[in-house]
Image (cartoon, rainbow, N blue to C red):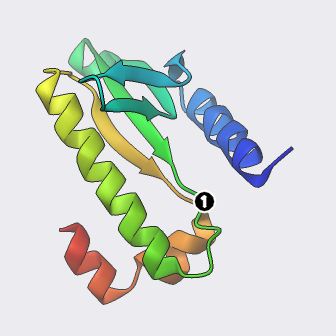
Amino acid sequence: MSAKDIFHNTVRTALGKDGWTITNDPLFFKLTQQFKINIDNEAEKFLVAFSATRKIAVEIKIFVGRSAVSEFHLAVGQFLNYRVALEKLASERVLDLAIPTDIYQDFFSDSFVQAVLR
């Protein structure tokens, strides 16, 4: 089993433990003839406090390349494309990015990365 598959299953399990139901794995859209989107997971959760269902699309990135900076650039570019695509489709889904804890602690906590993400 590849590292991507292991992390994918870990994210699915974590979502399930938090009360999310996976509704598509993957979530696929064909926007144009050339542009197709394949987001890793779609999930939904009923929020009792709001009497509403929240829907998310989760893109999973594992950062296994030689350069965390290059992996970050790829992840941000893909994330922006997916977010625009979901907006174009008038989707109620919120796009989330799942990353390993060590990448979050060691790389995403950097002040420059935080400035980019604002």
Residue 3 pos. (x, y %): 76, 53
95 sits to left or right of 27: left
Q: Which quadrant is home to the N terminus?
A: top right
- Judged from the image, the secondary structure of the residue bearing numbered disc 1 is loop
| 83 vs 44: above or below | below
100 sits to left or right of 88: right
Question: What residue appears at the point 29 percent right and 40 percent down from the top-left corner?
Answer: 82
Which residue, given by chain and number where applicable, does mark 1 sit on? 62
Q: Quadrant of residue 73?
A: bottom left
Along the line of sight, the residue nearer the viewer: 32 or 8: 32
Q: Quadrant of residue 11?
A: top right
Q: Which amino acid type is shown beneath numbered disc 1?
A: Ile
Q: Farthest right residue?
A: 1
Residue 65 pos. (x, y %): 62, 72
Question: What residue appears at the point 20 percent right and 22 percent down from the top-left corner?
Answer: 92
Along the line of sight, the residue nearer the viewer: 79 or 15: 79
Q: Farthest front residue?
A: 33
Question: What residue appears at the point 50 percent right and 70 percent down from the top-left corner?
Answer: 104
Q: Which quadrant is home to the C terminus?
A: bottom left
| 31 vs 8: above or below | above
Residue 78 pos. (x, y %): 35, 51
| 45 vs 100: above or below | above
